[in-house]
Image (cartoon, rainbow, N blue to C red):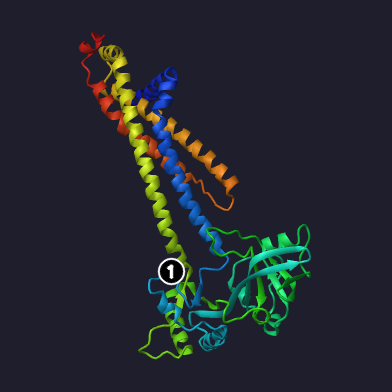
Amino acid sequence: MSRFLYEISESVRIAFAQIRANKLRSSLTALGVIIGIVAVTLMGTAILGIDAGVERSLAGFGDDVLYVTKWPWRDVQDWWNFRNRRDISTDYADPINEWIAANPAGPLKVAVPSAAWNANVIRGEYRLSSIRIVGTSSDLGRIVRSDMKEGRFFSELEGRGGRNVAVIGFDVADALFPGESSLGQSIQIRNQRYTVVGVAARQGSFLGLFSWDSQVILPLSAFGRSFSLRSANPDIRVQVDLARMDEAKDELRGVMRRVRKLGPEKKDDFEINSQQIIREQIDPIKQKIALGGLFVTGLALFVGAIGIMNITYVSVKERTKEIGTRKALGARRRTILLQFLIEAVSICVLGGLGGLATAWAMSAVVAVVMPSFPLVFSAGLVLVGLSASVVTGVFSGFAPAWQASKLDPVVALRYE
């Protein structure tokens, strides 16, 4: 065992001596490996970043919320069938909550009406365009997972009374009240003025998904004084027991069919959506990134492996007499094999480290230029990159190393 370890350490020493002696050749040889590792690392970083961005954007709305809507959250071919459906009414929340109260052990917890419209928000000389205005009940504060930077969510009394109060997103507060607190101050939406009672903490957005940052939340009755509820794309958000999601969907579907007075022979004229649908729509994006990254990675590593194999063959030819001398002095075939194999692996590992460093630097630049894209550079990606480098080195170096180990010492000593 000690002899084998000595052979390994000696082979590593010889490999790095050869790399130092041929710096330019070794660098050019490792270029293909560097490109391959950069590709696989950036691919993994992008995929992990997409996952993190989606989770961050959806986190404030909860995995345990179902959405009763007119349209499904997916592409549909027979769109005219969905267009002809009856609109969802915010009044549906009341019979659903009555059902929940009568069945406290069921999987449904609370139903929250919601309607939204884009409008301008004004405060003095400051004006924001196309801000999402959401009308809802105070129960929305129970089902969302967004913290408050300042203040509070509006109360049930304020919600049922239709008070002109508002909870605003972080970006809205930052733009309308730069350098000062917005609590207790007024904003104007259309012909109504609203007192700010709360500011949501910064959440961030990704790929255009949900975010509190650029929204204003109003009590539903107050919202209805400025906007048409029927035209405001209303929906019902129902918090459920996450461990009983399938049962919750079935129960909610049954309640909605009763609310909509649908006979047994009629199809559902509403849709029950969940955040899982959004995640499933993101999967094709990740798959395309993975396929493109794997193609570039495979091509670059193959080209790099061929280059390292050729250079290793050249190295074997250049050192044929040295190999003959070592064999004549008693070196084993295993020793010669390890020497050239470790040299090839060393070039690949150095290329892999260079690729990882380059990918990390590129990720840092992207993070500065596009801060909304949450790149994730994990230890797992480093392990994958180094593993790919080692495999490439073994693949490219084995054939020339095997050829070197089989050289006849007499023939090798006579080689010129």
Q: Does residue 133 sit above or below 403 in this rendering?
A: below
In this rendering, the answer to whether 415 lies above or below 139 is above
Q: Position of residue 301 (x, y in %)?
A: 36, 36
Residue in front for this viewpoint, 207 or 404: 207
Residue 81 in view, yes or no: yes
Q: Quadrant of the N terminus?
A: top left
Residue 247 at what x, y percent from top left? 42, 78
Q: Amino acid at mark 1?
A: Arg
Q: Is residue 200 visible?
A: no
- Can you name the residue that lies furthest to the front here? 80
Tag 1's secondary structure?
Answer: loop
Q: Residues within 10 Å of mark 1 (few under 14, many from 20)?
A: few
Q: Residue at x 35, y 23 (%)?
A: 7
Which residue matches tag 1?
A: 74
Question: What percent of the width, then of the height, locates residue 206?
Answer: 54, 58
Q: Is 115 displayed left or right of 193 in the figure?
A: left
- Res 115 quadrant in image: bottom right
> Is 314 left, or right, of 373 in this rendering?
left
Front-most of residues 7 and 138 = 138
Instruction: Specify whether 397 is left or right of 82.
Output: left
- The residue drawn where x is 34% and y is 28% is 307
Q: Position of residue 99 (x, y in %)?
A: 52, 88
Location of the C terminus (image quadrant): top left
